[in-house]
Image (tube, rainbow, N blue to C red):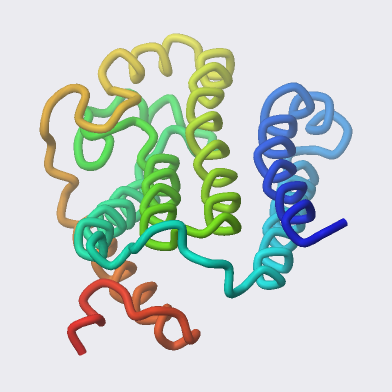
Amino acid sequence: MNGEAALALWAAAFPATHLLLSHPFRAPLVRRLGAGGFMALYSLVALLCLWGMSEAYKALSGAPHLFDPLPFWWPVSLVTWFAMVLFAGSLRGNPALPQPDADKIAARPVGGVYAITRHPMMWGFALWALSHMVINPTLPSWMVSTSILFTALLGAAGQDVKKRKLMGEAWKDWQARTSFWPFAKGFAHPGAFALILGTLLFLAVTWAHGWLGAYPTGLWRLL
């Protein structure tokens, strides 16, 4: 198996295993393994797929760019920063995460990143993937980014289905008051927590690009 075929296999396995374990296989595995055992298995499979993608991707380093990404550095940096803001805001008050009081969280007034989209974590990953497809336009990069993009958006859509079954009217009400697509219900402020933590994450991650030997990104390109 050549390098591109190996990467394609791992890139396909990541969303496939994510969706299978999150939906048709979830209930029987939880009954057999318990909630903790299921989460351990789920995390192990995800990490295995990410490791496989990473190793296959590294074997294809040096792949040529399909176009010049330089003119897109700053727009892409802005999109990546916004992705980090969405991700940071999703870390608290998120009824989509597995927690016993999710119905009470869903009953709260909509605010922060949830006024932008009810799936801020998934859209954070999706926007990250899209930005990397533009700024690193190589075939291996597109394979990895497409895998993450599909996992995020199909996972978000599947999450709506699963949560309606698990939470009933609580999720239906939350779904009616929020939007799947960012800003579909109008412009909204993400909140101070998301802005501050997301900006710090953005600065840390973009700094790590240079530390790891990759191209400088974001504000670090000015230094």
| Coordinates of residue 55 in the picture (x, y in percent) | 72, 68
Front residue of this view, candidates 205 and 172: 205
Front residue of this view, candidates 174 and 210: 210
Asked if one can make out residue 36 in the rendered structure from this viewpoint, the answer is: no
**Image-based side of 204 in relation to 221, left or right:** right
| Coordinates of residue 119 in the picture (x, y in percent) | 39, 34
Quadrant where the N terminus sits is bottom right
| Coordinates of residue 141 in the picture (x, y in percent) | 54, 58
**Image-based side of 210 in relation to 41, left or right:** left
Q: Is residue 19 above or below residue 193?
A: above
Point 58% across, 20% down: residue:
162
Q: Is residue 221 above or below residue 20?
A: below
**Image-based side of 157 in relation to 104, left or right:** right
Quadrant where the C terminus sits is bottom left
Front residue of this view, candidates 23 and 61: 61
**Image-based side of 193 in relation to 167, left or right:** left
Point 33% across, 68% down: residue:
201
Point 44% across, 88% down: residue:
211
Point 26% across, 32% down: residue:
182
Asked if one can make out residue 8 in the rendered structure from this viewpoint, the answer is: yes
Q: Where, by quadrant of the figure, is residue 122 drawn?
A: top left
